[in-house]
Image: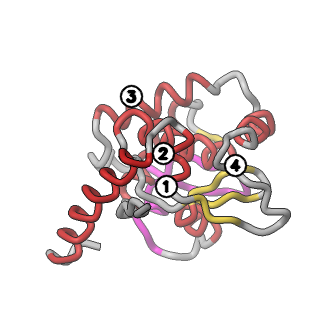
Amino acid sequence: MREPRFRFREDKAAEAAVEIIRLQGGHSDMIRVMKLLYLADRESLEKRSIPITGDRYVSMDQGPVLSMVYDLLKDTAIDSVWHSRVHREGNILSVAGGAPLGALSDEDRQIIRVVVERHASKDTWALCDWTHRLPEWKNPHGSSIPIEVSQVLSAVGRTIGEIEEIAQEEDGWYNLHRAIGVE
């Protein structure tokens, strides 16, 4: 089976994080934002066959993680779209300012809103425990294990044939973006 490839959109990831932070009162801990971003991508894959961020996923000790967002969170010294929108102080994230980027669609925002509302009653550690029950998460025992998009799609009920169709369509978009110089 061919693996669907999506292009990481830092602008969408940053704007989705800002939306999550705003929906939680203007600040949130890093782990919680990471879990909600993952769950929003997962919900989007279930509903629309495309993620919001296009990031790659990994299983880590506290549950699924968006790989490139995780790297952005660790390296606060780099100048990026993410850091112009999301401020980190210790383990707390807040909105850094600036007008919305316009990267998120109304559907993206609705998915994020639904995910945040669905998990509002869980504290961060209960949310982590909850993500450990997702079928695509595997205990990495202190390391990390890649989670393929096809695993997520399968976990949300897509058939092998549907995953193949998604991969074929995304290959076309991916190749088009590379051909016109959009990485």
Q: In screen coordinates, is 152 left or right of 127?
A: left
Please name the amino acid that badge 1 sits on.
Val
Q: Mark 2 and 1 residues: CB-CB less than 8 Å, in contact?
A: yes
Please name the amino acid that badge 3 sits on.
Gln
Q: Nearer the viewer, mark 2 or mark 3?
A: 2
Label located before the other in sequence (4 or 2): 4
Label 1: which secondary element: helix
Here the colouring is secondary structure
Q: Which residues are magenta?
A: 79-97
What residue is at 39 percent from the left and 33 percent from the top? Answer: 47
Q: Mark 4 and 3 residues: CB-CB less than 8 Å, in contact?
A: no
Q: Nearer the viewer, residue 6 or 70?
A: 6
Q: Mark 4 and 2 residues: CB-CB less than 8 Å, in contact?
A: no
Number of disc labels: 4
Please say if 84 is above or below 77: above
Q: Nearer the viewer, residue 50 or 38?
A: 50
Q: Give the labeled residue for mark 1.
A: 149
Label 2: which secondary element: helix
In the picture, the disc for residue 153 is 2
In the picture, the disc for residue 110 is 3
Label located before the other in sequence (4 or 1): 4
Q: In screen coordinates, is 31 left or right of 104?
A: right
Label located before the other in sequence (2 or 3): 3
Q: Nearer the viewer, mark 1 or mark 3?
A: 1
